[in-house]
Amino acid sequence: MSMFMRSVVMSLAVAFVVMLVIFITVFMAFPLPDVSYLWEQHLFSLPFIVIVPVISLVIGGFFGMFQGITARRQLKQVEEGLREIENGRPVYPPVVSEGTEVDALWKRMKNVQRHAAEQARASQKLANEKAEDQEKVIQEMISRERHRLARELHDSVSQQLFAASMLMSAINESTEPDAPENRQLNLVEQMIHQSQLEMRALLLHLRPAALKGKSLQEGIKELLDELAQKVPIHIHEKIEDMRLDKGVEDHLFRILQESVSNTLRHAKATSLEILLIEREGLIILRVSDNGIGFALDENKAGSYGLQNMQERALEIGGTLKVVSLPDKGTRLEVKVPVISVEEDQND
């Protein structure tokens, strides 16, 4: 039965019940000797027997209209709920009477939504697992290839640059200081020296050292000791002892490696400052140099490295801020909130 027909039937039923109640009440309150007496009694210039059905029909009509409006509003809500489910958004059913058809419909809609959400979660889980497996394979292939390139560059180009540097030093020592070609030879030696620095930074970038069971503090000190032996740069460090999760340590160490690599390759700095401290519930890693700096709004090749560091900082719930000005140096600062064991257990 359609909604319109149902409203008509409900209106007629209510009108009949009202009319019946009125007649029974009148007959019980005012017993009449004859039914024809109802035609003789008038109300609003109409016979009583006519006015009662009219009033009953009006009441039934209002009741049917109210029922129709209510049913239309409920159907509109159901339509909006179905549209929300179709768009993948949660459904919040309105307050309806328990046990009614609309209430049962909303319960079925919630069940459909719950099943759809479970299927979506299962699909996303499978997709994430597949993507993670593919990412692991790709990262392993990239790591092997980077190590291969680093090894070949170290065994060939790096050794040749070292030999060329030694040869140029010997030539410069044997050349008269006032010789006209001495200036050009010094420039060549400086170029070779700069190429060695860039090669060491590139090797550090291609073959980053891993912590391998060491703490973050031990890894930083080992990295700085290696830099001090291979790179002519003044290193100032302040590293405090603290306990961190391995995931946080690994990401901070990778950020430090990327920052130091960018400094060696682009900054032309003579001083490097490394700071690792804990203040006011925050782990702070700061890398500062006195190099040439750069404009942050410029689209340089190093921006990809900055993006990687930004993503690593976000993955451990931290923030990364870079301040750099041309000829004023660069400062990179990572802040990570400290999550204690007690807070983790309470969550």
Image: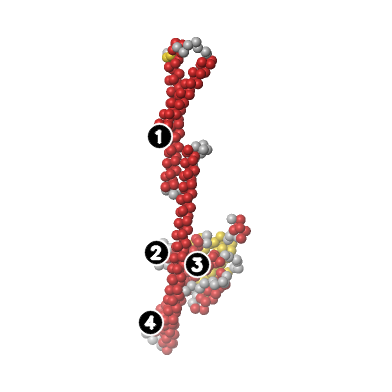
- On the image, the x and y values in percent for residue 50 come to 43, 17
Residue 153 to residue 38: above or below: below
Look at label 3 and name its amino acid. Answer: Ile
Name which residue lies at 45% across and 29% down. 10
Q: Where is residue 105 in the image (x, y as percent from the top left)?
A: 47, 41
Disc 2: which residue: 299
Q: Nearer the viewer, mark 4 or mark 2?
A: 2
State the image coordinates of residue 297 (x, y, percent, origin top left).
41, 62
On screen, residue 287 versus residue 83, left or right, reads right
Q: Badge 4: few (under 14), some or many (20 or more) residues near its Cα, within 10 Å? A: few
Residue that badge 1 annotates? 2
Please name the amino acid that badge 2 sits on.
Asn
Q: Name the residue under label 3.
A: 255
The percent coordinates of residue 278 (x first, y second) are 58, 63
Report the residue that reaches farthest toward the left: 180
* Residue at 48% in and 11% down: 34
Tag in front: 3 or 2:
3
Q: Quadrant of residue 78?
A: top left
* Measured Cα–Cα span from mark 1 to mark 4: 99 Å
The residue where tag 4 is placed is 184
Amino acid type, callout 4: Gln
Between discs 1 and 2, the one toward the N terminus: 1
Which mark is first along the chain, 2 or 4? 4
152 and 310: which is toward the camera: 152
CB atoms of marks 1 and 2 within 8 Å? no
Q: Is mark 3 on a helix, strand or loop?
A: helix
